[in-house]
Image (spheres, rainbow, N blue to C red):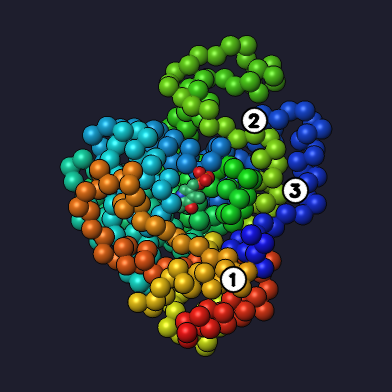
């Protein structure tokens, strides 16, 4: 499809090309000095003590569960209105995901009261997702976690650069997991990052990233070591220098691009309020600073969403759904038998995501909203 207004678009310039070319010319392609610089810069940016880059956020989530010692017999509370990777990570380590409902029609984030309702003697952790980059109620969630002795993992795939009470998303819980997939606020194609303030967790994560080995090819190339031991059943979840180089350039643009996303989101709110008030945008007066990753809207009840999406598609406007709820997937039926999440299920039926990217123009926002108004009037 040649979309006139795509759902997302990447901000790449000559800087990214030059950075990747420099890596190619250096002939050191696997994890090395560029990766180290990327990690240091990401830690400084996020305010986390440690940052560890990985091959993608799914690997980051898996490693977070491993590092916290979650395993068979354990339960982990997760939202269902998320990408399937959030829950899959729990299953990779043999634990059981337990799905909690969201706050409401204006707040699609996991509900603290629902988290509390889902706690059993087997609950070990909670994975929160800052939906669209709008902060979860972290003070309340950390309070509950402390009270019941639970760990908190942040799936911050949407929220890079977002903040709550001056503290960046991804640095509230024990471990933060970031995605640099192509449609995220900063991208390396495939790629991800882990953040933590705890040295013990950082050491474990570092070991799990590379086969449980105590030294790496880079250490041996630098003459720091000749051999290694394997101390854990680890994985190959490494990033590479080409992606780290892309990540460094993308990180420089992130703050500016997030501001532009916020500006466009405000403009969408105003325009929709005026032209099609029956369609609502959640998180209207939400605390903190959102990374404005996507623009979700809630269609009125009894509107056939697929018809709306078809009409917009015919106009060259790409839309999406965030998300088909995880607990209803075929691969999840056997473990979620009987799980009912009324808010999540209703929102998942009526949610539609509109185009949003830093280079988008105000006229395009108006155009999208006008087309939306047109199809709803029919
Ligand atoms: C994109 C995304 C992921 C997975 O990220 P990858 O880097 O593609 O593995 C996980 N959780 C959420 C909420 C996401 O949006």
| In front of the other: 318 or 16 | 318
| 334 with respect to 243 (left or right) | left
Residue 283 image position (x, y, % from top left)? 43, 71
In contact (CB < 8 Å): disc 2 and disc 3: no
Q: Nearer the viewer, mark 1 or mark 3?
A: 1
Q: Residue at x 23, y 58 (%)?
A: 340
Above or below, comparing residue 214 to residue 29 in the picture: above
Q: CA distance from mark 2 to mark 1?
A: 44 Å
Residue 300 image position (x, y, % from top left)? 38, 78
In contact (CB < 8 Å): disc 1 and disc 3: no
Q: Nearer the viewer, mark 2 or mark 1?
A: 1
The residue carrying pointer 2 sits among few (fewer than 14), some (14 to 19) or many (20 or more) residues within 10 Å by Cα, namely many
| 172 with respect to 372 (left or right) | left
According to the image, label 1 marks what residue?
Answer: 314
Marked residue nearer the N-terminal end (2 or 3): 3
According to the image, label 3 marks what residue?
Answer: 16
Q: CA distance from mark 1 to mark 3?
A: 33 Å
* Numbered badge on residue 31: 2
């Amino acid at each position: 499809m040649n979309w006139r207004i795509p759902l997302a678009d990447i901000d790449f310039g000559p800087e990214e090309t030059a950075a990747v070319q420099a890596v190619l010319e250096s002939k050191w392609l696997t994890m090395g000095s560029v990766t180290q610089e990327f990690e240091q810069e990401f830690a400084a940016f996020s305010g986390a003590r440690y940052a560890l880059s990985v091959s993608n956020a799914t690997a980051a989530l898996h490693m977070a569960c491993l590092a916290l010692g979650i395993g068979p017999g354990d339960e982990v509370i997760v939202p269902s209105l998320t990408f399937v990777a959030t829950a899959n990570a729990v299953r990779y380590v043999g634990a059981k995901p337990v799905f909690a409902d969201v706050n409401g029609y204006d707040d699609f984030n996991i509900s603290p009261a629902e988290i509390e309702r889902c706690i059993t003697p087997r609950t070990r952790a909670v994975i929160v997702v800052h939906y669209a980059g709008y902060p979860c109620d972290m003070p309340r969630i950390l309070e509950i976690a402390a009270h019941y002795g639970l760990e908190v993992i942040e799936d911050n795939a949407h929220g890079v650069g977002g903040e709550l009470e001056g503290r960046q998303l991804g640095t509230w819980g024990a471990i933060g997991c970031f995605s640099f997939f192509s449609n995220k606020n900063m991208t390396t194609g495939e790629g991800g990052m882990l953040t933590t303030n705890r040295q013990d967790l950082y050491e474990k994560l570092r070991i799990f990233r590379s086969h449980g080995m105590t030294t790496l090819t880079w250490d041996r190339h630098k003459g720091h070591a000749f051999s290694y031991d394997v101390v854990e059943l680890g994985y190959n979840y490494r990033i590479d220098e080409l992606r780290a180089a892309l990540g460094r350039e993308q990180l420089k643009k992130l703050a500016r691009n997030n501001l532009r996303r916020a500006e466009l989101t405000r403009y969408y709110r105003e325009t929709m309020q005026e032209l099609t008030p029956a369609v609502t945008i959640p998180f209207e007066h939400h605390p903190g600073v959102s990374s404005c990753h996507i623009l979700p809207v809630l269609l009125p009840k009894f509107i056939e969403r697929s018809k709306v999406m078809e009409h917009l598609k015919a106009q060259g406007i790409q839309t999406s759904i965030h998300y088909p709820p995880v607990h209803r997937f075929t691969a999840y039926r056997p473990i979620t038998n009987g799980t009912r999440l009324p808010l999540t299920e209703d929102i998942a039926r009526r949610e539609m995501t509109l185009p949003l990217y830093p280079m988008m123009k105000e006229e395009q926002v108006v155009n999208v909203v006008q087309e939306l108004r047109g199809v709803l009037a029919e």
